[in-house]
Each structure stands twice: as structure tokens, then as C-alpha cells.
């Protein structure tokens, strides 16, 4: 099974692949998926992380297989199941699941953000929940699962140290990022690189409401010199936020940087069509600072 993203740009919609682990239903953004394969023979790797089942080589390409059941604290499946081959953060990784149910087209406004009783601040692996008929589908944070195995796949924080000593810069920067952990890492890295005037928002809707408020109050140019946005966020995604900014006569001058694990060739074309000024994958925090330097001059 191969997947194709057919959504229009900036509609605040996504396609979710529903799959199962036992009797539990989970989801993944189709934009992360390269293909789905039937189970293939896995070669174990000595001394690898407990979540890593091993490696296999479809079409001469070595891919790591993660046991999704084990990463969620479940017993490994006795059935062979399927591999969901993903691509994000410039990594190709296979997630071993039991079965695939189908693909649903939903709006980000339909995705319920888990509260703190479900997601501990930095430890939760759910980014949202969708109610479908008589069941709940939990959207998993696949980046968090991979980062727990190898932290440098999340943000290359070492890149900030390589920038050396930098002057303090008070240009106001707006950030839209729904992951509390990544939001903290991004803000810490930007502060270390000299940017101290940060306006942090939990999703695109929150950021957009503030932009509209600043515009109505006549202080937009003083309050926001640059917007950094993730793509995947509940209520309003980063593509919708970019579209709204670039279609507004008073806001379109504001540089928008898309900073997401989903910046592949197809998503890059979408971002360009919407008017994004720069697009970077999540590990490249050093390049993010360089893009801000360039765009706010």
C-alpha cells in the first residue's frame, strides 16, 4: 500500500491512517508515511534499544524496525502484522503494527488535545484524540517515540554551541508549537543564541488570535518580527496559519519559518505555494537560528 497526499494547501485538514495494536485504535498523519508493507524477516541488532526489533532491507535500503507495542508498554504481538514505513526528521523508520483499518480525512479542529491526566508534560506519546462513531482513535507522537530512543534525532542542540558567542537580540519572535517538550527545547536554544523576546503559543489558532489582536490594536509591527511554526498542531495547523498570514495585507510582510519534522519534498512544495519564507526540518536548530538572522535583518 502506497500513500498519496491529495489535500489542498492550507485547508486545516489532514489525512489520518487508523491502525490497531490489539483492541486499541491509533492514528498517524498520512504525511509521515512512505508506504505500508507486509511483515518481512527482521535481523536483530546486538545491544540495540529495547524498542528496536532490528533491521530489514527492502529494495537495498536498510530500515530500522521499532516494536510499537513494546514502546507503548504492551506485550509484543504473536502475529506478524504490518510495517508502516515513515519518513520524518530526515529518517526512514518502520513501525511494527498489528493491522491497518483505513484512512480518514479530518480537520485539525476535530482533534482533541489530551490533558495532563493523559499526557505528563514531557512524557506523553499522544498528540491528540479523534472521536469516530463508537471509538476513540489516539494520534501518537512518533517523533517523541524516536527521540526517546535517540535524542539527537529530535533537535541537534549541539548545533547551538557551534554558533559561538552571540549578541543579545530583542526582536520579537512568535512561536507556534504544540509539543511542550519541543517548545521548551526551541525556546531554550533560541535564548542561548541571543533571541530573548519570545512569544510562545500552543497551536496555530492561539498564534493567529494574537496576531489579529495586535493588528486591531495597531501594534503588529512592534509585536512580531518573525513567526516560527510547526505543521502538525490541533485546532489550526502551520500551513493554515501561514496561509492566513500571507493573505492578510497587514501581516504578509512578516517572515514565516516552517520548522517541522514533516518538511519533505512534497510538503516543501506546499509550504512554498503558501508563501513560507523558509522551511526547515526539526533537527536543524542551528539552521533555524541562521534563517531568523537572515529574515529579520
Image (spheres, helix red, strand yellow):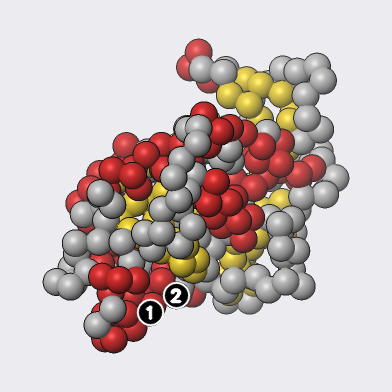
Q: Measured from the top left, where is residue 103 in percent x and y?
A: 47, 56
Q: Measured from the top left, where is residue 253 in percent x and y?
A: 19, 62
- The residue singled out by tag 1 in the image is 209
Q: In this view, does 248 lie above or below 51?
A: below
Q: How packed is label 1: few (under 14 Cα within 10 Å), some, or many (20 or more)?
A: few
Q: In this view, does 286 lie above or below 241?
A: above
In-image side of 288 versus 155 (left or right)? left
* Marks 2 & 1, CB-CB < 8 Å contact: yes
Q: Measured from the top left, where is residue 120 in percent x and y?
A: 75, 63
Query: What residue is at 57 percent from the left and 18 percent from the top?
Result: 62
Query: What residue is at 19 percent from the left and 64 percent from the top?
Result: 252
Query: What residue is at 17 percent from the left and 73 percent from the top?
Result: 250
In-image side of 81 versus 75 (left or right)? left
Q: Residue furthest top?
A: 60
In-image side of 118 versus 228 (left or right)? right
- The residue singled out by tag 2 in the image is 206
Query: What residue is at 38 percent from the left and 79 percent from the top?
Result: 209
Amino acid at each position: 500500500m502506497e500513500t498519496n497526499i491529495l489535500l489542498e494547501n492550507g485547508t486545516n485538514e489532514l489525512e489520518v491512517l487508523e491502525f490497531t495494536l490489539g483492541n486499541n485504535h491509533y492514528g498517524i498523519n498520512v504525511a509521515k508515511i512512505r508506504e505500508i508493507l507486509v511483515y518481512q524477516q527482521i535481523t536483530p541488532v546486538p545491544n540495540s534499544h529495547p524498542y528496536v526489533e532490528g533491521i530489514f532491507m527492502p529494495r537495498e535500503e536498510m530500515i530500522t524496525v521499532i516494536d510499537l507495542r513494546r514502546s507503548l508498554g504492551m506485550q509484543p504481538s504473536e502475529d506478524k502484522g504490518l510495517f508502516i514505513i515513515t519518513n520524518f526528521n530526515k529518517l526512514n523508520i518502520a513501525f511494527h503494527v498489528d493491522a491497518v483499518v483505513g484512512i480518514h480525512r479530518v480537520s485539525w479542529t476535530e482533534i482533541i488535545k489530551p490533558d495532563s491526566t493523559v499526557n505528563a508534560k514531557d512524557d506523553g506519546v499522544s498528540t491528540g484524540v479523534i472521536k469516530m462513531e463508537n471509538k476513540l482513535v489516539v494520534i501518537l507522537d512518533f517523533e517523541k517515540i524516536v527521540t526517546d530512543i535517540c535524542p539527537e534525532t529530535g533537535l541537534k542542540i549541539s548545533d547551538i554551541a557551534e554558533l559561538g558567542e552571540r549578541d543579545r537580540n530583542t526582536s520579537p519572535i512568535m512561536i507556534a508549537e504544540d509539543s511542550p517538550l519541543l517548545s521548551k527545547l526551541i525556546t531554550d536554544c533560541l535564548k542561548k543564541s541571543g533571541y530573548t523576546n519570545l512569544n510562545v503559543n500552543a497551536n496555530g489558532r492561539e498564534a493567529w488570535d494574537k496576531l489579529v489582536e495586535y493588528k486591531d490594536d495597531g501594534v503588529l509591527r512592534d509585536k512580531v518580527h518573525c513567526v516560527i511554526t510547526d505543521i502538525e498542531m490541533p485546532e489550526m495547523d502551520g500551513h493554515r496559519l501561514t496561509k492566513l498570514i500571507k493573505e492578510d495585507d497587514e501581516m504578509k510582510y512578516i517572515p514565516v519559518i516552517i520548522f517541522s519534522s514533516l518538511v519533505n519534498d512534497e510538503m516543501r512544495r506546499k509550504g512554498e505555494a503558501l508563501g513560507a519564507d523558509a522551511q526547515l526540518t526539526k533537527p536543524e536548530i542551528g539552521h533555524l537560528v541562521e534563517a531568523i538572522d537572515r529574515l529579520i535583518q
